[in-house]
Amino acid sequence: VIPVENAKPCYLKYKPESEISVIPQGFDNSGIRTQDYKPHPRPTFAYAGRFYRNTRDPRPLFEHLASLDTDFEFVLYLIDIEPYFEEMIKEFQTKVKGDITIKPALQRDELIYELSGMDFVVNHSFSYSTATPSKLIDYALTGRPVYSFSPVEFDIAKFDRFLRGDYSGAWELPPVEEYEIKNIAKKFLAMSE
């Protein structure tokens, strides 16, 4: 059993495709709280997670933010920030008209609550497609639109629309029910019948 369809090719050297099942990672979402969203006076958005050189380097986003004559607040909830990225963020904090704030990582339920109050959230996808970050389930639970970009594609026009409150083209997130732990447990139990 593997958690994502896209990962199947990685396992075909070990098992034939007929013996590989896909059951997503499960989460208990029963205690999740969200805020009553109200638009902010200035665009307020957030990113949560890690940055990685080559596979998840956010420099194009920061360079674009530095080019804007726009006030905004960009909140980063970062896990284990590398010195390379810490220095990069400090550099851009002095170049932007808005505010870039680094906050420590939060527990999952606290993070979802905080993100649910943002105008939108940012996803930086990997440059490969054999994994799906569990963060996307958390993003879906926030109820906020998602601007997603990859190391090879940063859609400036779409990002600027998000800053203006136009979330058309928001990234489509998976239905959270598919990842609810009770539903996942039923799938595993059905395999043993």
Image (cartoon, grey):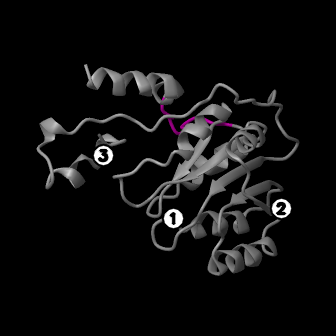
Is residue 172 on the magenta stretch? yes
Name the disc covering residue 6, or none: 3
Asked whether, in this view, residue 192 is left or right of residue 188, the answer is left
Residue highlighted by disc 2: 99
Q: How would you rate the neighbour count of disc 3 (Cα within 10 Å): few for under 14, some for 14-19, many for 20 or more? A: some
- Determine the residue positioned at 54% across, 34% down: 27
Which comes sooner in the sequence, label 2 or label 3? 3
Res. 52 in view:
yes
Query: For the residue marked with disc 3, what is the amino acid?
Result: Asn
- Secondary structure under badge 2? strand
Name the disc covering residue 56, or none: 1
Is residue 106 on the magenta stretch? no
Query: For the residue marked with disc 2, what is the amino acid?
Result: Asp
Q: In which quarter of the image is the C terminus?
A: top left
Residue 144 point in image, percent of width and height: 67, 35
Q: How would you rate the neighbour count of disc 2 (Cα within 10 Å): few for under 14, some for 14-19, many for 20 or more? A: some
Asked whether, in this view, residue 140 is left or right of residue 45, the answer is left
Which comes sooner in the sequence, label 1 or label 2? 1
Spatial separation of the CA atoms under disc 1 and disc 2:
22 Å
Spatial separation of the CA atoms under disc 1 and disc 3:
19 Å
Query: For the residue marked with disc 1, what is the amino acid?
Result: Arg
- Determine the residue positioned at 76% across, 60% down: 104
Of badges 1 and 2, the one in the foreground is 1
Of badges 2 and 3, the one in the foreground is 3
Q: Quadrant of residue 169?
A: top right
Q: Which residues lie in the magenta part? A: 166-174
- Secondary structure under badge 3? helix
Res. 170 in view:
no
Magenta segment main secondary structure: loop
Spatial separation of the CA atoms under disc 2 and disc 3:
37 Å
